[in-house]
Amino acid sequence: MKKIILVMSCVALLGVAACGKEAKKTAPPPPEVTVFQTETAEVPIYHEFVGQVYGFKDIAIRARVEGYLEGIHFDEGLPLFHSL
């Protein structure tokens, strides 16, 4: 019984202590801000890319059998089918 009374009195004291006057809150000081002076200037715009370029009608010719190429029987750049 004494323990219950002791615990309840501690809780009551804490409750009374918490009901005191509120401390006046002040606003924090403003943060420091760094300022730069701007100026206009001509800046070239360029891009660098790495890649490969192929023609519209490039065809990779690969052998499907073993052997040696004895001749090339077409002219590069001419269409395969001529219109009549």
Image: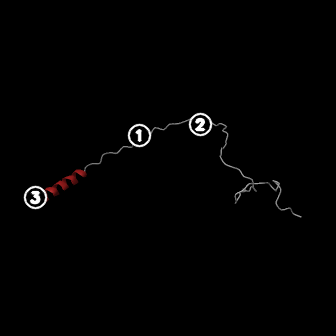
Element carrying mark 3 = helix
Between discs 3 and 2, the one toward the N terminus: 3
Give the numbered dot on residue 2.
Answer: 3
Between discs 3 and 1, the one toward the N terminus: 3
Q: Which quadrant would residue 84 be assigned to in this image?
A: bottom right
Q: Position of residue 24 (x, y in %)?
A: 32, 45
Q: Position of residue 51 (x, y in %)?
A: 66, 48
Could you tell whether 5 is left or right of 44 in the image?
left
Give the numbered dot on residue 38.
Answer: 2
Q: Is residue 80 above or below residue 44?
A: below
- Can you tell which of label 3 and label 1 is closer to the viewer? 3
| Residue that protrudes farthest toward the left in the picture | 2
Q: Could you say which is closer to the camera, residue 60 or residue 19?
A: 60
Give the numbered dot on residue 29.
Answer: 1
In 3D space, how far apart are the residues under numbered discs 1 and 2 (Cα atoms)? 27 Å
Report the amino acid beneath label 3: Lys
In which quadrant of the rendered image does the N terminus lie? bottom left
Could you tell whether 20 is left or right of 30 in the image?
left
Q: Could you say which is closer to the camera, residue 30 or residue 53?
A: 53
Report the amino acid beneath label 2: Thr
